[in-house]
Image (cartoon, rainbow, N blue to C red):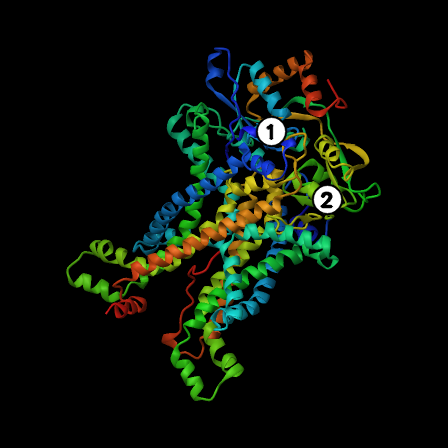
């Protein structure tokens, strides 16, 4: 499932022959603001797109973006339809058995519950989550009844229209939605630390590419550009490196 | 854990009976076969219920479409056109949104956003429209001689319909109706795929197949298992409808008996 | 985009709507309707070709060939199309790359399946990783077309198989009496005569094909359903100039209207085609035409 949506390919400036010829295809979902989404112009945009382009520039790689449904994002990576995943994917043990991750470019995340009122029963009520995410796994193990939707948008809609008592998702995905709701939606309960930060997913056989991107991420962490980007997309409260 | 224990734990998981948590690591083939099979309960439930209830409405719609009175004919024509003319996939999406807005206005609609009721209603209306069209075609091709003979014997009104028109119509429509049944069962795979959310990880066969595809990151095991189950289901449907076909045709001389040939006359 | 759309927040009513409906994202949505039509235009003849092949195989005198044809028809028809769509594209893609790998890289010494990874040499990749983006897109689209063609080919094969048997036996016997070889009979009599019997089944299949296109997004093609979901979802002001609530209902209503209109037009066109094909045929409808003309 290779698909569309080329966003600007980053031009490789170097003549590092072998690598410059090859295009590194970067897979993302395009439905998870502010990490990655499709902007008004119909192009991929977001924190990970900006970060990925910068990483490719530092690593002197020629990169091209591809969007893919979340459900099949890992099978398509391992069958070589693209070479990396940057889609707000938390580093977990199960995923790590199948693919490799770079070091995290986004600090370990907290997930949070959002509901329509303070006294919503998020512990034993109905909780919506996106299918096949670590959040869905967490809710399935809790006392609450899990209600699964195919995309993150629908999980929030489920709370709005009363299908679910609360939605459980990544804090930084929920925050802009709560801010924009004008008091309709609110965070309830304490945030839950889940997952080991967000990293770039790669095939296990692609050690060389993993090292390259690891170095690029390290250099961005060292000179503070990664922190600037995090603040730009997620606001001042975001954890920094 | 032996395979028998797995079956005991997960055989009825799709109904919420047995182990509460789905397997999360060390997936075995047995677990996949058991859970996907457990999900088939829902496919059979949706298919059977929609088929049985749709049958009655389909007969009414077919007669409505054949009626001379425009107040009966026009609504039947539109009903058939809307449900046959649009993809079931979009009907599911649309029904879910529609039920949501109805629900916020009238508490009566509370259970309609759950798949067990909401999706059944969509499938019921859908199959009624498709079968209605099949029956309509069959009503038109009931031999004129049969009707004249019925008149000569003094049949009229309800008893003429019940004893003559309706059985003949069924007999003529049966091969196409068998196809419709097969495709209805296939269509049940779309329930949890579009619109209706799965609750407490209780879903149909496709839901569990995609659960395993996601957890094992390997689509090549669960989907073929799913395909195998559906082939079995299809064969069962063909077998059962074949028996009914024999009964419908039992009065005919041996040589004229229409053998049930499965042709895709009306599919989705 | 219209020039006055630079500050959508200041607009209201129709002006806002006009700007909203002409964003680049909406243009992609409108373009997706073209994608769907293009897919139908290519898939229909491709599926017919698969169907013809399947029907000929199923009729074959040689038992293994006949089993192959019948098996193809039975298996594909026994399984919901959605189950095929979920893994077929990756499977086809891997199969092609595997074959190319065997042909192009005989000296490759690493395993192709490294744990979970499916790795072939660079020359065998489809399309080559250095290929421009449009090649990747066309390849993805091509795989989608092939998957559709294989699935619907099985249904078409079943229809054509029935239609070939429906051609009156007297016509075949007449052809034989004129001294035609079996091959000539097949080409000159059977195939031209079968269409009138196949058309009702094929028109149904066409309708089914139209209504299966919303599943296109499963095959990785960004189709109208993908865009309707994307555009209709609630938008917060941080990421768009056009924030709005949950409008998916309206977008799906638009899709519903599109499909209804499209099937209606198809129905009318197919009815005309049937009238033309029936002309001069030895069927009830053909006889009725003859009487009306006389």
The local secondary structure at tag 1 comes to loop
In the image, residue B10 above or below residue C229 = below
- Is C110 in front, or is A12? A12
Badge 1 density bin: few <14, some 14–19, many ≥20, Cα 10 Å? many
Q: Label 1: chain?
A: A
Residue placed farthest to the right in the image?
A119
In the image, residue C244 above or below residue C54 = above
For marks 1 and 2, give the CA distance. Answer: 36 Å
The local secondary structure at tag 2 comes to helix
Q: Position of residue A107 (x, y in %)?
A: 72, 23
Residue annotated with mark 1? A99
Q: Which mark is residue C112?
A: none
Residue annotated with mark 2? A160
Q: Label 2: chain?
A: A
**Closer to us: mark 1 or mark 2?**
2
Horizontally, residue A36 falls left or right of residue C208, namely right
Would residue B38 be visible to someone looking at this image? yes
Q: Residue at x 52, y 57 (%)?
A: B82
């Amino acid at each position: 499932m290779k698909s569309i949506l080329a966003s600007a390919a980053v031009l490789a400036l170097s003549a590092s022959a072998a690598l410059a010829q090859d295009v590194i295809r970067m897979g993302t979902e395009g439905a998870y603001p502010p990490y990655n989404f499709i902007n008004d112009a119909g192009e991929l945009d977001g924190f990970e797109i900006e970060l990925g382009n910068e990483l490719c520039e530092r690593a002197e790689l020629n990169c091209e973006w591809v969007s893919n449904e979340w459900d099949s994002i890992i099978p398509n990576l391992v069958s070589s339809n693209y070479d990396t995943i940057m889609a707000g994917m938390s580093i977990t043990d199960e995923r790590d058995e199948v693919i490799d991750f770079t070091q995290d470019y986004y600090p370990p995340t907290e997930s949070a519950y959002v509901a329509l009122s303070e006294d919503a029963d998020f512990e034993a009520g109905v909780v919506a989550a996106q299918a096949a995410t670590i959040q869905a796994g967490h809710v399935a193990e809790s006392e609450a009844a899990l209600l699964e939707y195919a995309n993150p948008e629908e999980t929030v809609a489920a709370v709005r229209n009363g299908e679910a008592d609360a939605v459980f998702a990544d804090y930084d995905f929920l925050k802009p939605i709560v801010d924009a709701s004008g008091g309709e939606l609110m965070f309830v309960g304490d945030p839950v630390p889940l997952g080991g930060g967000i990293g770039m997913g790669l095939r296990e056989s692609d050690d060389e590419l993993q090292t390259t991107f690891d170095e690029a991420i390290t250099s961005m962490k060292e000179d503070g550009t990664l922190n600037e980007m995090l603040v730009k997309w997620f606001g001042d409260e975001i954890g920094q490196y | 854990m032996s395979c028998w224990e797995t079956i005991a734990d997960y055989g009825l998981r799709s109904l919420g009976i047995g182990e509460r948590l789905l397997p999360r690591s060390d997936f075995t083939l047995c677990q996949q076969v058991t859970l996907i099979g457990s999900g088939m309960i829902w496919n059979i439930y949706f298919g059977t219920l929609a088929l049985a209830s749709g049958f009655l409405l389909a007969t009414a719609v077919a007669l409505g479409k054949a009626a001379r009175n425009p107040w009966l004919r026009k609504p039947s024509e539109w009903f058939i056109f809307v449900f046959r003319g649009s993809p079931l996939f979009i009907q599911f999406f649309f029904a879910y949104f529609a039920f949501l807005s109805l629900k916020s206005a009238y508490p009566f609609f509370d259970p309609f956003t759950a798949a067990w009721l909401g999706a059944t209603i969509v499938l019921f209306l859908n199959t009624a429209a498709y079968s209605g069209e099949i029956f309509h075609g069959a009503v038109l091709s009931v031999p004129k001689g049969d009707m004249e003979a019925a008149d000569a014997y003094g049949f009229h009104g309800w008893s003429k319909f019940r004893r003559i028109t309706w059985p003949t119509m069924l007999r003529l429509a049966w091969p196409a109706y068998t196809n419709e049944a097969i495709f209805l069962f296939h269509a049940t795979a779309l329930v949890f795929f579009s619109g209706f959310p799965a609750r407490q990880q209780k879903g149909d066969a496709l839901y569990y197949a995609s659960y395993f595809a996601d957890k094992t990151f390997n689509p090549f095991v669960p989907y073929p298992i799913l395909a195998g189950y559906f082939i079995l289901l299809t064969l069962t449907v063909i077998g059962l409808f074949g028996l009914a076909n024999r009964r419908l045709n039992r009065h005919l001389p041996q040589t004229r008996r229409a053998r049930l040939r499965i042709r895709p006359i009306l599919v989705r | 985009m219209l020039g006055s759309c630079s500050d959508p927040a200041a607009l209201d009513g129709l002006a806002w709507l006009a700007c909203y409906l002409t964003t680049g994202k909406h243009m992609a949505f409108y373009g997706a309707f073209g994608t769907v039509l293009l897919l139908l235009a290519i898939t229909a003849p491709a599926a017919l070709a698969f169907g013809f092949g399947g029907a000929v195989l199923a009729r074959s005198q040689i038992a293994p060939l006949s089993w192959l044809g019948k098996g193809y028809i039975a298996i594909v028809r026994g399984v919901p199309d959605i189950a095929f769509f979920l893994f077929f594209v990756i499977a086809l893609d891997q199969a092609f790359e595997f074959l190319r790998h065997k042909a192009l890289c005989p000296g490759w010494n690493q395993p192709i399946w490294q744990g979970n990874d499916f790795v072939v040499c660079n020359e065998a990749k489809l399309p080559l990783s250095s290929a421009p983006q449009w090649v990747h897109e066309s390849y993805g689209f091509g795989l989608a077309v092939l998957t559709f063609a294989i699935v619907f080919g099985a249904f078409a094969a079943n229809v054509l198989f029935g239609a070939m048997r429906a051609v009156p036996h007297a016509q075949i016997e007449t052809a034989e009496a004129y001294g035609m070889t079996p091959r000539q009979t097949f080409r000159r009599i059977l195939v031209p005569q079968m269409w009138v019997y196949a058309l009702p089944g094929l028109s149904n299949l066409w309708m089914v094909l139209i209504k299966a296109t919303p599943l296109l997004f499963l095959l990785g093609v960004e189709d109208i359903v993908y865009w309707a979901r994307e555009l209709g979802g609630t938008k917060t002001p941080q990421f768009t100039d056009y924030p709005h609530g949950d409008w998916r209902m309206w977008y799906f209503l638009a899709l519903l209207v599109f499909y209804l209109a499209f099937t209606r037009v198809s129905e009318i066109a197919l009815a005309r085609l049937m009238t033309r094909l029936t002309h001069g045929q030895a069927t009830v409808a053909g006889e009725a035409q003859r009487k009306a003309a006389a």
